[in-house]
Image (cartoon, helix red, strand yellow):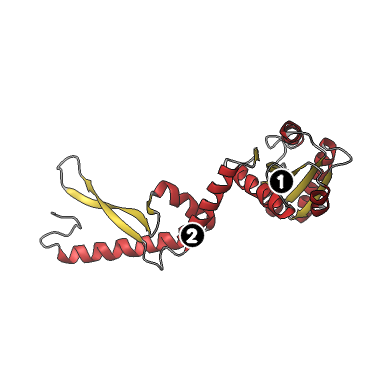
Amino acid sequence: MLEGLVRSGENFALFALDLDRFKAVNDLFGHAAGDSILCRVAEILRSVTRDVDLVARIGGDEYMIIQRGIDDLREAQLLARRILEAFGEEMDITRDPMAVGVSIGVALFPDDAANAEAVRHNADVALYRAKERGRGVACFFDLEMDRLVRERRELEHDLRHAITRRQLSLMFQPLVATDCGNIVGYEALLRWAHPTRGPIPPETFVPIAEDVGAIIPIGEWVLREACATARSRSRRCTGSKRWGCGS
């Protein structure tokens, strides 16, 4: 249908929706409860859209809405607001343990894209940003958003290979006893030297590692390297049983 709308030149907004907490609800209460939630979501979406609009579940907990024949951004903003308000009323997590939320990404044709594939991609980019901002919000596509998302995905890819490419390293910060001023240990600090971007701060790459599942192998690498360094230093350290005994 997207291709047909694009060929016709009709203005429309494409909404990409992702249910928040659905997997947890499905795992906790079972697939029958999950199916019931999906039916409730479909009813909510039908209640806030027009007959000419298209609401479709495209898989799992993902939906799309095509809002047809819109004149400007404000109409898409109004629909996004209605969706969020409807979920807030019908899916109250404080009262209903099976309630779910929704994150929304929106792209407009032809303002944001020249073809069906691009408008779909841009709606997904906006959804990615909505989920990144804490979920339960609606984000509208813009070019800066696309640049940031592409940069983030490049970092995700590079981070998965950072260990094998020997780009990670540890720095050791002394821990000093306040009562005597002696060094009693060291704190291992992780650093990532990207070959083209230079040093990437931990506050940037650690959350990415957590999101993409790379934090476990990175954590294991840190433990191995820290222990190897401690063992090597303790062998060089004479006259004391504690690592960091002098220098």
The reply to whether callout 1 and callout 2 are in contact (CB within 8 Å) is no
Classify mark 1: residues with Cα within 10 Å, few (<14), some (14-19) or many (20+): many
Tell me residue 171's x, y (percent).
28, 54
Q: Quadrant of the C terminus?
A: bottom left
Q: Which mark is residue 56?
A: none
Is residue 156 shown left or right of residue 27? left
**Which amino acid does the dot numbered 2 rest on?**
Ala
The residue at the point 37 percent across, 56 percent down is: 192
Please give the name of the residue rendered at 33% of the width and 59% of the height, measured from the top-left corner.
Answer: 169
Please name the residue shown 47% across and 60% down the image: 158
Q: Earlier in the sequence, mark 1 or mark 2?
A: 1
In the displayed structure, 181 sits above or below 191; it is above
- Residue 90 location, quadrant: top right
Amino acid of disc 1 = Leu
In-image side of 52 versus 165 (left or right):
right
On the image, the x and y values in percent for residue 198 come to 36, 54
Q: Which residue is nearer to you in this view: 96 or 21?
A: 21
In terms of image quadrants, where is residue 196?
Answer: bottom left
- Determine which residue is flagged by label 1: 17
Q: Mark 1 against mark 2, which lies toward the viewer? A: 1
Circle 2 residue:
214
SS at circle 1: strand
- Classify mark 2: helix, strand or loop: loop
Q: Nearer the viewer, residue 177 or 80?
A: 80
Query: Vertically, is 176 above or below 236?
Result: above
Q: Percent from the top left, x then y, of residue 164?
A: 41, 68
Question: Which is more toward the observer, 42 or 127?
Answer: 127
**Badge 2, how many Cα within 10 Å: few under 14, some, many 20+?**
some
Whole-number angstrom distance, CA of label 1 to CA of label 2: 26 Å
